[in-house]
Image (spheres, rainbow, N blue to C red):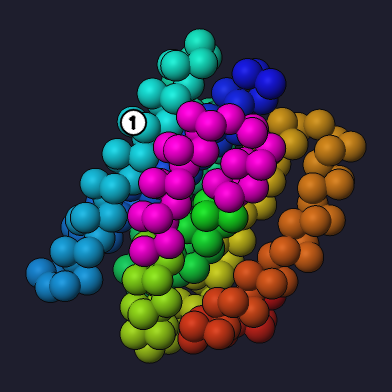
Amino acid sequence: MRRFAQRAVGGLIAGEEATASACKRLVDLLPPGPARDCLSIQAEDEERHVRAYCGYLERIGQPAEPNERIREATDRLARWSGPPAGLFFAIHVVLEGEALGLQQDLEGDLDCPLFRSINRRVTQDEARHVAFGRIISPVAASELDDHDRRRTVEEIHAVWTDCIRALSAENFVLWRALSHFADRHWRAQLANMEQYGLSAPEAA
């Protein structure tokens, strides 16, 4: 169980690191204003979450390291070269929403009071980040032309697929099972992005 915890929480650490880096990237790209201030706070939240999860792994005697495969998959978000509005969707509609679901699932899977205590404080922050994304995403979508909408969806899908490959650890049987699940879940994510204004059916 401790080994499972190290791998699962290591994935969370990699995701939190990626989100913090992506938020900082957006802060560099945006003009001063409320959105930039919120992203600065969010980056600090994510870095605090990394410290909390690392502390948990140390307490249970496991290496406090991120999942390197997940880190490689999500690192492209920190190098985002597309329009800033597209990165909003990558962070707040997809990455944060997925992280929140995974964090909630792991509470039951790990069944550890210490993890549950840490995780519930983290998920309170994540729920606030998701709510911020729901507010800002329609505004961000309005700033994208058709080309940038397609490019944004394609880039998010690439990160999504790389994360699934990372989770399968290049095990072909597991990759096939996860890829079928991911395809169904990706369609749900496309519908979610469309709900917030990012409609790109050509890229679906």
Of residues 94 and 170, the one drawn nearer to the viewer in this rendering:
94
Q: Which residue is mark 1?
A: 51
Q: Is residue 8 magenta?
A: no
**Rendering coords of residue 73 (x, y %):** 55, 42
> Which quadrant of the figure contains the C terminus?
bottom right
Q: Is residue 133 above or below residue 71?
A: below
- Per the image, label 1 sits on a secondary structure element best described as helix
Q: Quadrant of residue 55?
A: top left
> Which quadrant of the figure contains the N terminus?
top right
Residue drawn where x is 78% and y is 65% of the image: 184
**Rendering coords of residue 109 (x, y %):** 68, 37
Q: Is residue 126 magenta?
A: yes
**Rendering coords of residue 199 (x, y %):** 56, 84
Q: Is residue 29 above or below residue 9?
A: below
Residue type pointed to by label 1: Arg
Q: What span is in magenta?
A: 102-128
Decide if residue 116 is in sight here.
Answer: yes
Of residues 48 and 154, the one drawn nearer to the viewer in this rendering:
48
Residue drawn where x is 36% and y is 40% of the image: 49
Task: Report whether 6 appears left or right of 36.
Answer: right
Residue drawn where x is 66% and y is 42% of the image: 108
Q: Quadrant of residue 23?
A: bottom left
**Badge 1: few (under 14), some or many (20 or more) residues near its Cα, within 10 Å?**
few
SS majority, magenta = helix
Decide if residue 25 is in sight here.
Answer: no
Q: Is residue 16 above or below residue 123?
A: above
**Rendering coords of residue 63 (x, y %):** 49, 15
Q: Could you tell me how many numbered marks the image carries?
A: 1
